[in-house]
Image (cartoon, rainbow, N blue to C red):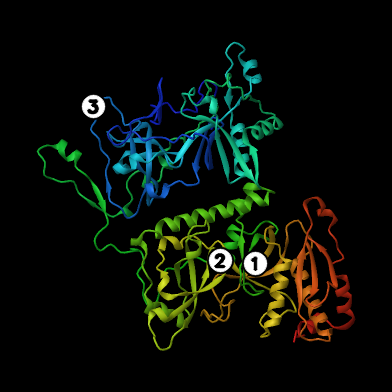
Amino acid sequence: MAATDENISVTKVCRDRSPRLLVTKKKRVMARNGIRYRKINRMEIQDTAHCRIVEVDSPNQLFAKFDTDVTTNLQYKCPHLLTRYYVPRPEGETRITDYVMAPLEEDVYARARILKEKPDESQPGSFYCLVVFIDYGSCQWVHTDTFVVMDESLYYQPWQAFAFSLFGVSPGRRQDVLANAKKPKRVWTQEHKKVLSEIIGRYEKFIIKAVVSLKDHVKEECFPYHLFAIDEGRQIDIALQFALECRRAGLEVDIDRSSRLFSDHQEYRTKYYIEPKFDEKLIPSWRQKISSIWGEVIPANSQGPSADASLLAKHAYLDAVNRKFDVEFEPSAERPTPLIKTFNDALFQREFVENNYMTPFILISTDKMSINEFYVMPLKRRIRQKHGDSGADAVEEAKKELRNFCNALDAFYVESCNRHAVDPKITCEALLAGKEQYAVYEVPHNADSGDGRYRRVMLVGLRLISEDHCDPNSWMVQVVYMDFGGFEWVPLTCLLRIHSRHCLQEPFVVQVYAHLPGVDPHRTSARYADCLTTILKASVPVHSVILGRFHHHPCKHGKIESAVPHCRPNVMILDHFKVEDSTTYLEDTIQTLFTAVLREGRLNEDRTVRVIIEKKGGVIRLRNVRQEPRYRIDYEYPSDDEKSNEKADVLEYFHKKAEETRTSDELANLSLQ
């Protein structure tokens, strides 16, 4: 929301300076902090550090976090003991600058600092407070009824998100001088912020460097720093890039790195509101009162000589002794687990299909894939409309939503009280009966990666590894990853119960069964299947946006079979698919390649010669393992500059051979053996 010149917001929030390092005449000393002084230190960079940007308010206020931050250790995650925050104050004194624990999410409390107060008209004596989450750099409006006491040890951990400003950049003078030549107002606009946010969004890793000459001269909250983005080993100066792109967009920006000019380091106002707008209707209920998921309320101690004593009494929120893991669902033989809403025609039509009846998606690369069992990530229509023609930005936002969901799963199941093993008897009986069921599986080798440690899985197969010891430890379960694609055999004892709240989100990927006329993917020949898989991997680009037509493939007999991948929930048939902005359908390319390989393999005198597919520089080749490359397929995926020059002579040699000898149906019946 843009403001007028008379109502201009200030980037720097007016509050007491948070303790960090006190600048004295002799030396720099640490300011007092802790629960006694109600202060928490901020971190100051002395030289160089690796970081990531988490919030962009203006060029004079950005929030960053070190790669080694310990934010997850400075939170309260449900279940946890909560004590209501209440501090008696003299009349006229406010809570501003106090540190509290405030709800970041419904089941997560994070450290926060109170910046503003606004009376709650419905509850006299209560307030809505604007707080900044000091470990994230974001601001939210929260009711005082949700504040809880911060543990004393958390006062001695510095802010994990630190604010800084880009050194050397300032708003241009020209427009402000024309408006008021005597006292020009140099302000940052919403357009400046948009340009800077777009630049920051292109990179993931950054290096921040201190301006040594200004260490002892700057008195502001946001210290000036040099900021560099790391891109393929190169360091890109963000300030210079910002000034360059602003001037290209017609925005006034000055850049000057002289220490004399910036010895006082001015912080310029913004012509827009940095803090979120207050609207009581938009505040979630769990930010107005403590959510019931934290447990039962222990009432205040009634013993006390006066009413004032009851106000000071602690109101604790504890889990009940016999609290259930999931109050909304109880496992049974008829319904062993809550069900995830999987993909079907209605879901595709509502959220994915575009005006041309095609659905954009990207291919998910897995170790084990075949023509009747590979996985794709559909892109939602709202994401595509938001980013327009930028397919890369749409893909990045879809992956960001997946990362956020994975972080929520990790934050929930990392707590030991939320990890409950599935019932072995109910699970095995349901698998043998072919019933649909889901669970959560911890992936050990991805514990430190950003791909999600705890993943939703669908149970599709059961196998006994030791007939001599028929106990839960001897059973292996085949699982399909609902959000990443692929399948794996895992021990039954490693599966965890899935909470019903985590079943509300539809899967991020869908299993696809490609329909190719004249090609039977269910042939028993292993070489036949390997050839199809190799051609699929070589023909379909992994990082490009692909358009396709999907329709649902329901299981006819209603049972899940491990040996029949297409007889499962969350399976769609893919009829037509092509690279975006291309005219050649990929199923035609795959079919032609396959029939050509079958024919050439049949004509070879040595029946054991295996023909494989290569793809180098966008060109697909057929290669004989015992000889030099014999066949070159003149087909390339069009680049952005050559979309109109797409070649039409695809596999002309093999098409000609096929027409001279056999029809496509006859070629499909050929065997590689």
- Gap in angstroms between the C-alphas marked 1 and 3: 67 Å
Q: Which amino acid does label 2 sit on?
A: Phe
Q: Residue at x 31, y 33 (%)?
A: 38
Placement of 183 over or under 670, stated as above or below = above
Placement of 434 over or under 345, stated as above or below = below
Q: Residues within 10 Å of mark 3 (few under 14, many from 20)?
A: few
Dividing the picture into quadrants, the one containing residue 650 is: bottom right
What residue does disc 3 label? 90
Q: Which residue is drawn at 44% across and 28% down?
A: 13
Q: Which image quadrant: the C terminus?
A: bottom right
Q: How crowded is mark 2: few (under 14 residues within 10 Å), some or many (20 or more)?
A: many
- Gap in angstroms between the C-alphas marked 2 and 1: 10 Å
- Name the one closer to the observer, 403 or 73: 73
- Name the one closer to the observer, 394 or 469: 469
Q: Given the current orientation, which residue lies at the most extreme bottom position?
A: 468
Q: Pointer 2 and pointer 1: residues touching (CB < 8 Å)?
A: yes
Q: Residue at x 25, y 38 (%)?
A: 86
* Residue 310, x across and y down, in percent: 17, 40
Q: Which amino acid does label 1 sit on?
A: Phe
